[in-house]
Image (cartoon, rainbow, N blue to C red):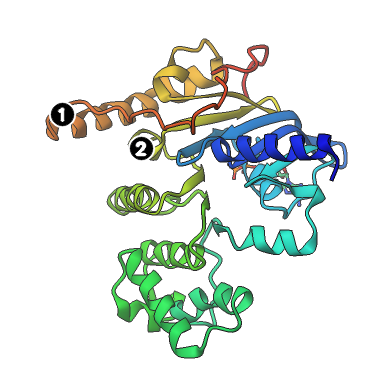
Amino acid sequence: MSDVDTLEAERTARSSDAFPIVVEGLRNAFGDHVIHEDLSLKVRKGEILGVVGGSGTGKSVLMRSIIGLQQPEAGEITVLGHHMDASTDDEGRDLRSRWGVLFQGGALFSTLTVGENVEVPLRQFYPEIDDTLRSEIARFKVRLTGLAEEAAYKYPNELSGGMRKRAGLARALALDPELLFLDEPTAGLDPIGAAAFDRLTRELADSLGLTVFLITHDLDTLHAICDRVAVLADKQVIAVGTIPELLALDHPWIQEYFNGPRGRAALCAKDDISMKDGAPKDRAPVTQGGSAPEEPVLKNTNGSGA
Ligand SMILES: Nc1ncnc2c1ncn2[C@@H]1O[C@H](COP(=O)(O)OP(=O)(O)OP(=O)(O)O)[C@@H](O)[C@H]1O
C-alpha cells in the first residue's frame, strides 16, 4: 500500500468512527425516472436518524443502496469504513453481518416459526454454532424485543401485527449488529402499539449502542425517539437536523409537514408527555466522536418541495 493509500485509509477510518454511514453524490434512476441526483448524507454514530419525505421520494431506494441491494448509477457509499462498490465478497459478507434490517411488513418466512426465522441469519453467518446454542440465542433475541419466549414457537400468522414487528426486529438483531435499518416500523400499528415499539427502539438503541436509520411517515416517532431527521425532496436530502432546527427552515414541504395540523398535533402530544414527566425534554445532541465536522442543516433551498 502506498503512503497516499495509507493516509486515505486512515482518513476513512477516522471519518467512519464519527459517521458509520456516508453517502456522497448518489444517483439512482430507473430508466428515465431519476430518483436521486447528487444526494449526500452522513449518519452520526449512535444516533437514531429519522428519514422522511413524500411518497416516492426514494427513502426505501436510499436504504437499499446503502445496504447494497440497489446498484447506484453514480456516487460513493461508505458503510463502517468500507466503500460499498469496492468491497470484496468477504468484506461484503462481513459488512452484512454488522447490520440488521427490518423491512416494511417484517418480511418473515411464513413457513418458519419466529425462533426459526431469527435463526436464519445465525445459520447463514455462523454455521459452526450448534443447534442448541443457536436456538438459545434466538430465544434470547425474541425476549429482548419484549415478546414472551413462547412466541419463538409460533408461526408469523399466529401473531398480531405488533408482535410480528417485534419478531422482525428480533431477527434484525440476531447478529448483534452495529447498524439497524428500519423501514416504516410503526406502519399499520395502533397508536399504543406504535408508541411501545418506539420506546423499544430507543431503549435497544441506547443499551446496545446502535446507530439507527429509520424511515418513517410517523410524526410521533420522529418527535419521540429521533435525534435528527433527514428530509428527502427534489431527489436529494435537502436538510438534516433536529426538529427545532428543521422547523426554523423556510422550506415549503418542511413547513407543511412539521407545521401542518398533524405535525402540530404530534408536537403537542410530545409536549404533553414531557410535561407529565416533569419537564419538557429535548433529546441531547449525540456525541459526534470528536473531530466530526459541522454539517449544514439546510443543504438546498431551491426546491419547491416533494
Ligand atoms: N425496482 C424498481 N423498479 C422501478 N422503479 C422503482 C423500483 N423501486 C422503486 N422504484 C421507484 O422509485 C421511486 C422511489 O421508491 P421508494 O420505494 O424508495 O419511495 P419511498 O420514498 O420509500 O416511498 P413510500 O414513502 O411511499 O414508501 C418510486 O417512484 C418507485 O416507484
Q: Residues within 10 Å of mark 1 (few under 14, many from 20)?
A: few
In this view, the residue farthest toward the bottom is 131
Foreground of the two, 146 or 296? 296
Q: Amino acid at mark 1?
A: Met
At x 63%, y 12%, the residue is 301
- Ligand 1 neighbours mark 2 (CB distance < 8 Å): no
Residue 1 at x, y percent in the picture: 84, 46
Circle 2 residue: 220
From where the camera sits, is residue 46 visible?
A: yes
Residue 282 at x, y percent in the picture: 30, 27
From where the camera sits, is residue 35 visible?
A: no
Foreground of the two, 41 or 274? 41
Residue 158 at x, y percent in the picture: 39, 77
Label pair 1/2, CB-CB below 8 angstroms = no
Identify the secondary structure beneath mark 1: helix
Give residue 287's quadrant in the image: top left
At x 30%, y 64%, the residue is 146
Foreground of the two, 57 or 132? 132
Q: Sequence order check: which comes first, mark 1 or mark 2?
A: 2
Q: Give me the disc on residue 235.
A: none
Identify the secondary structure beneath mark 2: helix
Q: Residues within 10 Å of mark 2 (few under 14, many from 20)?
A: many
Residue 65 at x, y percent in the picture: 71, 47
Q: Give above or below for 223 relative to 72.
A: above
Q: Give above or below for 32 relative to 124.
A: above
Circle 1 residue: 275
